[in-house]
Amino acid sequence: MPARSSLVGQVALRFLIAFLLSAALSTLVGAWVYYAANQQAADAQQTSARDHYTNVIADLERRWGRESFNIKIRIEAQRFLEDPKQRKEQLLAYLTAQGGSIEFPSLSIEDPKGELIVSFKYADDHIPKAKFLPGQESTWALDPIHGHLFLVFRQLIWLGNENGYLLLFKPMDHALLTQYSYPHTRLSLWWKGKPVASSEGEEGLTLAAQAFEQSGKSSTSSLLPWFGIDNDNSPQLLIESTAPPLLGIGELAGPLTISLLTFAVAVWSILGAWGFRTLRRVLALERAQNRFRTMGTVDATVDHDLRTGHGIEDDEITALAVALENQMRESISESRWPTSGY
Amino acid sequence: MPDTLRLLAALFSALLIAPPLLADPLHISVSVPGPGAASYLPVELISKIGADRAEGAEVSVVFSPGGGNSMSELLTNNADFAIVGLPAAMSARLKDPRVIALAAINDLPLYVLLVRQELKGQVKKISDLKGKTIGLHTNSTTSKTTSQQVLELIFRRGGVPPGSYRVVTVGRRWDSEALMLRTGAADAVIGDEPNATQMVEDKVAFQLLHLGDPETMRNYAGAGFLRGALIGRKDRLDKDPAKSEVMVRIVQRTLQWMASHTPEEIVGKLETRSPEERDRLIDLLKKYPRQYSKDGKFSARQLRETEIFFIDSQAGNPAAESFRIESMIVDRWAGRKD
């Protein structure tokens, strides 16, 4: 005969299992919400960042194109280049007096054969040699010694009796990316798999290396080709989100624990208390039955247990208590029934 | 047996020492006006004497046309630090609270007011420059470079108020400054040594005023201001204080090396100079032995002078007049002296 299992134990075990299942379910739901919300926020952030920087790149190219044309017009209007003897000195004095162009700190002018006529470097940039295909107006050039990347614009410029070339050099440096970055976003520019500039300076280059390797797999970074200039040979802009996740584990665990505890208290108040009260009535009837069988009579304890079994509600247990009492009354004479006042 | 033990001990010590030596050096970039400006010579010396390697770092120098540009390089992440005139950094600090000063580089400021040679006889005093075109290394309407502040101060004291002369940019290199004076694009320039001496020797210009002269220093309150200072950023210092600490130690090591070597030995380290340039620089170092700080410490007296100079040169600017230099001094590593 199997060992007797207590009803209280069964109910308590079921309550515990239900609580643990609820806790596990809440944790799973919490984890799902955590990953789904953060993933969605990261995706939305990357999508808007890509849209934003696509427009920024297009806008920059328009602005640099206008500025390079304006510089050519200004130089041609001065007519310095038409006098081969004086043109170098006059042009350099003119450019120096203006303090250099903010967009193009370095420029050079070449004759139709590509021989250098004059070179102006406002900053101490080392200008690399730029190679242009026929008809090409802009290209990329890397200074291999210092690792500086330049966007080079080329235009025809009138030298007095023939056209030469005006080359304008735009440094793609940390400053440019810093100027266009916004909080919680790190930008870095990559040229043939190597970082050349970052919105966080030199330190940003090291930090961006890992994100570059994971770009395409990670939802917090994406690569945007710098289209428009030379699509087959363009650098890539790596956009990294450095913002903390939308939902933190602590932020999610707190409300989940509170709701789980509230649920447990509510379940206990509604089901648990009622269940154990009902159970107490059944147990009281069992005790009354056992004691009656042992003693062969009804004493105050049996009477008390029968009254407990009656309970307040008129339900099946009440009917059972009444039936049990009637059975006991039939077994003994009415005079032996205690007058306990119950 | 003892020999074997000693060998094993030596190998073990070598293994312990090797990782720091093999580790990647800390990369530090510094933007400085130049090249060739005597005031910023310590920066050019850093890698030549190995002061950076001794601190486990590698310093790369980014030259710019002027103090304003160096400040921009610092504030836009193109450089980790800048070395510029402290008054220029104070002017930048009015607009950007990230700007901080970490160490003193110079002691004596050596600005020179040069007038183009053709005007010799016509220009004998500062007031004769009224209506003329004055060249500055760089120019900005939002923050003033040190040379701009020097110009405004000495001109106002000389009876030439702001707005009664024209300003043009002349760049920092000797060739661009000389070109602007020779072509008449500029009538006078606020120049630096040793370019100023060269321009006088080559009869491109003559000297009207030299801030390094003791008499000039007596006439101009605050003329002993702190010229070159190591400038950093507060946000970067908070994020990585070790980098600032290493840079201050490199600067101190370089200044101490300079203080313990002769002008010939110092210039001998600058390999790219022509013989004339070397002689000119040696003469300059001998003539102005007080040009550089010996230890990088901030001098309380010099900071007071710098504040006087800054407020005086920016008369009429309420923000500058209420500015206190102490708000931007970080002497945690460089230290102080009287």
Image (tube, coloured by chain):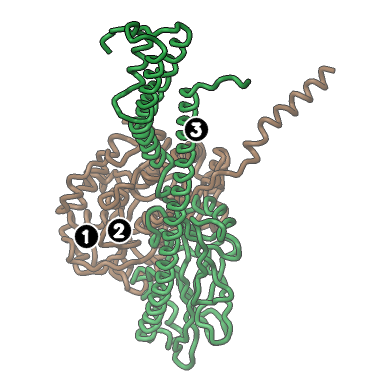
Chain colours: A green, B brown
Query: Residue placed at 34% from the left, 44% from the top?
Result: B100
Q: Position of residue A77 (x, y in %)?
A: 35, 86
Give the residue displayed 60% in from the left and 65% down from the top: A192
Q: What is the quadrant of the C terminus of chain B in the image?
A: top left
As helix, strand or loop, the secondary structure at mark 3 comes to helix
Residue A17 is tagged as 3
Q: Is residue B283 visible in the rendered structure shown here?
A: no
State which chain disc 2 sits on: B
C-beta proximity under 8 Å, tags 1 and 3? no
| Disc 3 chain ID | A
**Residue B44 at what x, y percent from top left?**
50, 50
**Residue B27 picture location, percent across and down:** 53, 47
Quadrant assignment, res B201 = bottom left
In the rendered image, residue B158, in percent from the top left (x then y), is placed at 18, 56
| Sooner in the amino-acid sequence: mark 2 or mark 1 | 2
* Residue designated by label 1: B126
- Foreground of the two, A171 or B34: A171
B314 in relation to B57, above or below = below
Mark 3 surroundings: few (<14), some (14-19) or many (≥20) residues within 10 A: few
Q: Residue at x 21, y 52 (%)?
A: B313
Q: Is residue A4 left or right of residue B39?
A: right
Amino acid type at mark 2: Leu
In the rendered image, is residue A220 in sight? yes
Label at residue A221: none
Circle 3: residue type: Ile
Is label 3 or label 2 in front?
A: 3
The residue that label 2 is drawn on is B113
In front: A194, or A39?
A39
Chain bearing tag 1 is B
Does the residue at mark 2 contact the one at mark 1 (Cβ under 8 Å)?
A: yes
Q: Residue at x 30, y 58 (%)?
A: B113
